[in-house]
Amino acid sequence: MIKLIKRLSEAHGVPGNEDEIRSIIESELKGCCEIEIDVMGNLIAKRGNGKKKVMLAAHMDEIGLMVRHIDENGFIKFITLGGFFDQTLLNQPVVVHTKNGRIPGVIGSKPPHLMEEKERDKVVKAKDMFIDVGAGDSKAAKKLGVTIGDYITFDMPFKELKSGLVSGKSFDNRLGCAVMIEVMKTVKTNHTVVAVGTVQEEVGLKGARTAAFKIEPDVALALDVAPAGDFPGTKPEESRIKLGGGPVITVADGKGRGIITHPSVRDSLIAAAKKGKIQYQVEVGDGGTTDATAIQLTRGGVLSGVVSVPTRYIHTPVEVAGKKDVSDTVKLVVAYIESL
């Protein structure tokens, strides 16, 4: 499974350009599922033919950037796709995806040697940053194949850390994709299970909305990551989620403007964890939300919940997660489906 996570993490796919991740999921599931790609680009993998439908949703897209302007000196200005804390962008290695292939670059900034004292205390905003691909001018950049609308991703390799931890880019939400793949390979149930690799979650939960409308599930789980707070500078009241604490069951997120998990789904997930002796954590989040929010509101409503892998430093190129938490998340989702 670690090889799968590495493959997914190092793949590239911003909102609207999830082809590479979709191909990986398709190659993993084509032997056990009926697969189709819908008009939005969602991958829909069906297993079984029972009366009840269980939907699993894991978004394939990662946060990224897009070329908006090439200046006369060949430097690239960009927009962000998804939620960023701008300081995490500075001085990161990136890849610009052009029609001519991938071009390496860096998000540059003025070094401290050239800064005035007041500049050093100033937070640089994304709109004031630029990407250097080594082009001498705009003509050279265009000759390399860089055009307006090209998407840009972080260039960060997957790493295994100590104590069973791993680090890489786009764990949000390639970990959810890995969990979904493993669940579909191992789950045993008389129900129909439909796994969806959704598109454009980071920019509005778009793929989940259209896929759920088509599938009409009886119950659905979004498989995602939850922000851990077990590092310096985070207060317990901000996040009690920790690595090694097991999969995270969401009660509510987005300050209630996201999902408020239906009690039957929440209680069944907790019961499945207890029965399977799987350590778990419970989350009440006031930040972002997941595909479950869109699925829940489809047609006449869908019983929905969220199961996540606890992850540090979400929405940065150096996200960190635990291998055991990932495998236990698979166990919990399988146990939940098989208990229905």
Image (tube, rainbow, N blue to C red):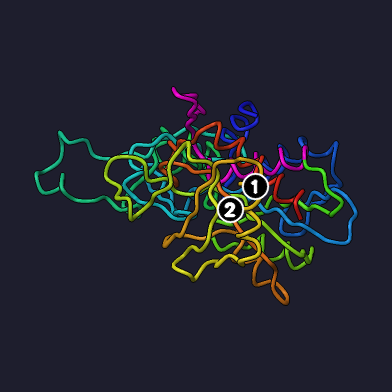
- Find residue 296 and report its image quarter: bottom right
Q: Residue 214: x and y, percent?
A: 79, 65
In the depicted view, which residue is nearer to us: 154 or 338? 338
Task: Report whether 142 appears left or right of 278.
Answer: left
Whole-angstrom CA distance, mark 1 to mark 2, is 7 Å
Amino acid type of disc 2? Pro
Q: Secondary structure at mark 2?
A: loop
Q: Residue 53: x and y, percent?
A: 81, 59
Instruction: Please give the residue where the numbered disc 1 appears in the rendered image.
Output: 18
Mark identifier at residue 170: none
| Residue 280 visible within the image | yes
Instruction: Give the crowd class for mark 1: few <14, some 14-19, many >=20 residues within 10 Å.
Output: many
In this picture, which residue range is highlighted in magenta? 157-186
Q: Secondary structure at mark 1?
A: loop
State the residue at coordinates (85%, 36%): 31
In the depicted view, which residue is nearer to us: 222 or 187? 187
